[in-house]
Image (cartoon, rainbow, N blue to C red):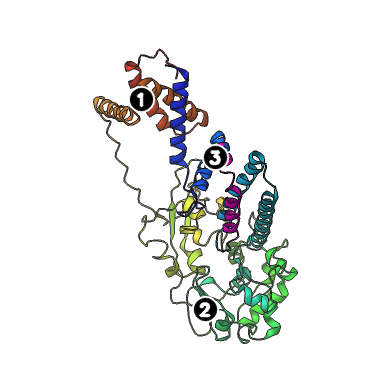
Amino acid sequence: MKLPRLVLLISVLLIALTVLLTPLSSDLHAEDSEFRTEFVFNHQNMRFKWQEFLVKQNKDIVRDEIKAIIKEANDESITFVDKMRLLDIANAMANMDVEWNKSKRDLLDKVEIMQAEEVLKANNRQAVLDKIKVAESTPGNFVLNTHKQEMIDAELKPVLYPHWVHRMFFRCKVCHEDIEVMQRGANDLSQAQIESGKTCGVCHNGTVSFDAKLKENCVKCHMYDTPKGDSYVDLTRFDAKEFSDIALMLGTTLNIENIPEDGLPLDKFGDINWVKMDQLKIINPLSSIGMKDDDEGVRDTEILFDVPFAFMKDVKFSHKIHSSWIKCSLCHDQIFKKELGANKVTMVDMKQGKSCGTCHGRVSFKVANCKRCHSYDPENPTKGILERPKPPAEPEPEEEAEEVNLRRQESAVSKLITLIRVPVDPCLLSLDALHMTISASHSDQPLKRNILATRSLLVPISHDPYMGI
């Protein structure tokens, strides 16, 4: 077989694969001109010679096309990604127009300025998000900025809500979910709601805590990105005497004498260890407000979660620790089924904010603090611990007969040859190229095996002495 024919065949196959694998771009609309559609296709598939021919042949309309794209990119309703995609096309088009058609640089300069401005805006937005991320790195700290314009008009900073301060005096079950739904953005917080005695206004009414209606108290919540707010991030806001006085006012206690010499008990990430806070009896948080009692109580059972890895200890889940802080109904059955062994718990789910990740990593200790959970010692077993039933073993798949596999492979090869309508030899070369690509990336081993099996079927019917895999 002649080399040019092989090169042409491989080129066609590669282009077809590229078109199939390249996602449709949102910058291609039904109203796009034929020129732009072809330009984008050439741009995506690096067809440089064809692109040069296209730009030179359409010299009279290129500048109008660039202006049209700039106009689309100035639409405030499109996303940053779509805007940058449009500007990328406009930049390429303007560059080629300057290079090949010797046009003026004015449009290219304009596009480059627009790109620089958008990148600067994106960097500024990211800087804001990064700063918020730092403020929220302390579990339970939330920056509330839903009513952004109202705050700007009132010359107020966004709200920084510190869960850890409230946990010094109240258990989570006091608010969740009778007062606040435990889902970010689900409570529609507003000053009007608070002043009507709802959400935060249940306590911040001048009786239980400071009055949120008074203007001088605004800065007590609207403190994000201030020195005061920073003290709620690094925990330096904690003042033992002040917090003890607040506890007495609320009808509970904060036992200063039980605080270790080196300060509040912290975990490896520098976050407050609330289990230790309870064990050392530093705090005695309220479980209800006023006359309303906690009607669900505390459940004192433990469940053993087997871990299928020798290097990681099993998990002992304590209902007592959790139900002392939150109501059983918060988890069951919204997050977990009540039946023993009915819930599949994975680290992937937790990282995605599911199962245990509903709280851990947000308002409770971080999921990355592995040993906080993986600490069960089988040498000292816990009496009465509940063991989850073992899932039934999956049946071993029956091995298919060799002749069935052979017929399937022969059918696949036959369909392949019929589909692309080329001799067997180019198929071998394409399979070899695909095999080398997969081998170099060290991925997709099942596909690699299928390629080798398919080639072994093609070789006997090939007249090409090339045998190289």
**What residue did someone put label 1 on?**
422
Residue lying at the far top of the rendered structure:
465
Choose top left, top right, bottom left or bottom right for residue 130. Answer: bottom right
- Residue 123 or residue 336, whichever sits in front: 123
The residue under label 3 is: 54
Identify the secondary structure beneath mark 2. loop
Say whether residue 215 is left or right of residue 57: right
In space, the residues marked 1 and 2 are separated at their CA atoms by: 78 Å
Disc 2 crowd rating (10 Å Cα; few below 14, some 14-19, many 20+) is some
Instruction: Return the x and y of residue 101 as percentages of the image width and height.
Output: 64, 41
- Residue 202 appearing in the image: no
Q: Quadrant where the N terminus lies? A: top left
Left or right of 39? Residue 282 is right
| Quadrant housing the C terminus | top left
Q: For the magenta stretch, what is the residue range? A: 53-75
Q: Position of residue 186 (x, y in %)?
A: 50, 71
Q: Which of labels 2 and 3 is toward the front? A: 3
Q: Is residue 373 left or right of residue 121?
A: left
Residue type highlighted by circle 1: Val
Residue 133 at least partly seen: yes
Which mark is nearer the camera, 1 or 2? Answer: 1
Q: Based on the displayed image, in which of its 4 quarters is residue 133 positioned?
A: bottom right
Give the mark, 2 or 3, whose residue is nearer the N terminus: 3
Q: Check residue 263 for magenta coloring.
A: no
- Going from N to C along the chain, the mark reached first, 3 or 1, is 3
Foreground residue among 209 and 12: 12
Q: Which residue is mark 2?
A: 288
Q: In the image, what residue type sits under mark 2?
A: Ser
| Residue 93, placed above or below residue 292 | above
Label 3, label 1: how far apart the Cα atoms are? 30 Å
Magenta residues, dominant SS class: helix
How crowded pointer 3 is (Cα within 10 Å; few <14, some 14-19, many 20+) is rated as some
